[in-house]
């Protein structure tokens, strides 16, 4: 059972006043945002306005770290989630990417550990994330928030040496940041100890479900104490497999901050028609110059395409890097750091970089290929326009991708603006006819000539009926073609099957076997053949050697094999 809370933005006349906070609305009742006090008996909720981190009941070392990072105003998700997490309740949060979810679960975790010091214990907090890049990003945020305290974290991700990670776990770090696959490997090896665990965080839970980590999350949760506090963060709580994850939580409070599908109103989305990949490569270079973009994400569908596009853009004297799942972790980390430090202008990536990566001041996102689904498109586009800034996303659409792009538009309930790039106008101008859904209308099916006049279409033959018709005509085909169904029966030259006792040779036609007497077996046939050969050898010894023609004639007179179709 969970308790839903929905947040909506309410514009105020003076945004700098202390009253400028978001509003919490439950059903049709409006409540002021955020400090939520949950009564365990009546489950009633009240709220107080919180506009800055200074109003949160956090440890002084955390306030010092926030001041150092120049974090003053809390985001919507932080205003809603942090007070409930501080009260010890489980929460499940749905919010768009770039909304500040990382600080929303790190601050309550660090506050509990500072307030309740427990020396000599094992790991107290576990954070699960879907990708290595997101884990590295979370580690950096953790180190910034914990810079004025003695709480340390350990990183357990794939692509790095296993033995060094074992040494890290033996040091019993207070917090472990991990990806599910590698952590399960350590659990099976007996390297982990979660007996003292107090916090379990599942960040980007929908992405972990898409990647097939459902069983791994359940296994990891089973190794944690049942009285832990669980915090779940996801782009959507309507994922088809989210119910299995919710079983790991204890009466969570549900918080939905905007809709992740409608949360990119500050991003201009456009589409440019393209003919092929070579045309798209020229379009990417032209769009980067037209927009005068300093940081650009280019998303591709496959790893090979990612590398090829990166190499082609590099040949155009552009500062380009690319990342995908097959690149070693050390190289991926280096490329991302160079992109963050403005040493690279363009980063070409597969969808591995579309989730959770926080790169500031990304001016432009270009979808070299249309995303596989509407959710993937949302997370690609979410790399720009973060923290309320303006952004732009452009999708390159070929003829084969029109319908998929139209499906994404329907999913998001918007229409992308059409754009042309100078002299690079595509020969493809879109489908000639469109359906109401926006997809291309295909050609009509041809009708039978007889039914065309009456306006009735030719009825389609069902598959089972076609098989039935074929089975009914099978005996006739068998008569027409003696070898169509194998050589189980010996056939005459005319195609009719032989009767019992009948042979293809005229000399053997008189031989027949009664019904109560079985035909001679193979051993009998062999003994008869050997005796015939011995008698012929004895007879030939008294005569002169025969000519080659006679030998060939005797060889042709050998009896046929008793099994048609087999060689004797």
Image (spheres, rainbow, N blue to C red):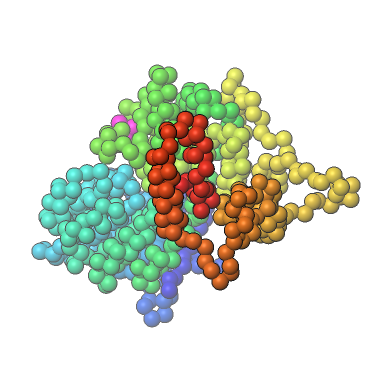
> Which image quarter: residue 399?
top right
Is 158 situated left or right of 351 in this image? left
For residue 188, above or below residue 87:
above
Q: Is residue 178 left or right of residue 527?
A: left
Q: Reply above or below: 209 against 136.
A: below
Does residue 211 sit above or below 220 in this rendering?
A: above
Q: Position of residue 380 (x, y in %)?
A: 46, 42
Which residue is at 40% across, 39% downward? 542
Furthest toward the front, the residue is: 542
Does the magenta portion include 522?
Answer: no
**Residue 519 in view, yes or no:** yes
In terms of depth relative to the viewer, which is nearer, 301 or 408?
Answer: 301
Q: Which residue is more in the foreground, 12 or 420?
A: 420
Q: Residue at x 37, y 24 (%)?
A: 319
Q: Quadrant of the N terminus?
A: bottom left
Residue 566 in the image: x percent, y percent? 49, 48
Residue 206 visible in this rendered orientation of the protein: no
Q: Is residue 195 left or right of residue 252?
A: left
Rendering coords of residue 293 (x, y %) = 45, 28
- Residue lying at the far right of the rendered structure: 453
* Numbered disc total: 0
The answer to whether residue 338 is magenta is: yes
Q: Using the image as rendered, state which of residue 235 and residue 53 is in the foreground.
A: 235
- 219 is higher (above) or lower (below) than 324: below
| Residue 298 sits in quarter | top left
**Residue visible at 51% across and 58% down?**
8
Q: Residue furthest bottom?
A: 41
Which residue sits at x=42%, y=80%? 42
Magenta stretch: give its range.
Answer: 336-340
Q: Quick check: 445 left or right of 533?
A: right
Q: Would you say the magenta stretch is mainly helix, strand or loop?
A: helix
């Amino acid at each position: 059972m969970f308790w839903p809370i929905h947040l909506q933005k309410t514009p105020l006349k003076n945004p700098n006043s202390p009253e400028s906070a978001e509003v919490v609305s439950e059903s049709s009742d409006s409540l002021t945002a955020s400090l939520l006090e949950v009564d365990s008996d009546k489950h009633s909720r009240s709220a107080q306005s919180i506009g800055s981190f200074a109003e949160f009941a956090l440890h002084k070392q955390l306030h010092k770290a926030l001041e150092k990072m120049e974090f003053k105003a809390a985001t919507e998700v932080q205003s809603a989630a942090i007070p409930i997490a501080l009260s010890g309740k489980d929460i499940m949060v749905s919010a768009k990417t770039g909304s500040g979810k990382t600080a929303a679960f790190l601050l309550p975790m660090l506050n509990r550990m500072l307030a309740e010091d427990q020396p000599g214990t094992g790991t107290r907090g576990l954070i699960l994330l879907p990708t290595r890049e997101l884990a590295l990003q979370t580690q950096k945020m953790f180190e910034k928030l914990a810079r004025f305290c003695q709480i340390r974290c350990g990183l357990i991700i794939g692509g790095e040496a296993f033995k060094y990670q074992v040494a890290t776990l033996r040091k019993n770090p207070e917090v472990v940041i991990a990806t599910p696959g590698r952590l399960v490997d350590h659990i099976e090896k007996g390297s982990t100890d979660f007996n003292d665990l107090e916090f379990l965080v599942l960040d980007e839970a929908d992405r972990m479900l898409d990647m097939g980590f459902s069983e791994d999350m359940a296994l990891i949760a089973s190794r944690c104490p049942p009285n832990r506090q669980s915090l779940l963060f996801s782009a959507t709580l309507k994922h088809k497999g989210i119910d299995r994850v919710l079983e790991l939580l204890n009466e969570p409070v549900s918080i939905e901050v905007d809709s992740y599908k409608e949360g990119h109103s500050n991003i201009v989305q456009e589409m440019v028609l393209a003919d092929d990949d070579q045309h798209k490569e020229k379009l990417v270079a032209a769009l980067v110059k037209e927009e005068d973009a300093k940081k650009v994400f280019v998303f591709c569908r496959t790893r090979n395409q990612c590398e090829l596009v990166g190499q082609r853009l590099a040949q155009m004297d552009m500062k380009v890097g690319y990342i995908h799942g097959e690149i070693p972790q050390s190289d991926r980390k280096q490329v991302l750091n160079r992109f963050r430090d403005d040493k690279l202008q363009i980063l070409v990536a597969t969808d591995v970089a579309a989730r959770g990566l926080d790169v500031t001041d990304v001016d432009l996102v270009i979808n070299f290929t249309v995303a596989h689904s509407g959710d993937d498109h949302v997370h690609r586009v979410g790399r720009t326009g973060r923290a309320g800034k303006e952004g732009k996303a452009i999708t390159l659409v070929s003829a084969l991708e029109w319908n998929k792009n139209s499906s994404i538009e329907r999913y998001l309930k918007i229409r992308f603006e059409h754009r042309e790039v100078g002299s690079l106008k595509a020969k493809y101008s879109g489908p000639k006819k469109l359906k109401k859904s926006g997809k291309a209308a295909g050609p009509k099916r041809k009708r039978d000539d007889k039914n065309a006049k009456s306006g009735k279409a030719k009825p389609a033959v069902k598959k089972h009926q076609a098989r039935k018709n074929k089975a009914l005509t099978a005996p006739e085909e068998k008569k027409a073609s003696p070898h169509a169904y194998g050589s189980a029966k010996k056939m005459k030259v005319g195609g009719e099957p032989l009767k019992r006792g009948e042979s293809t040779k005229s000399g053997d036609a008189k031989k027949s076997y009664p019904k109560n007497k079985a035909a001679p077996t193979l051993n009998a046939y062999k003994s008869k053949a050997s005796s015939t050969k011995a008698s012929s050898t004895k007879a030939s010894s008294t005569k002169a050697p025969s000519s080659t023609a006679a030998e060939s004639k005797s060889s042709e007179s050998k009896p046929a094999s008793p099994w048609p179709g087999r060689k004797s």
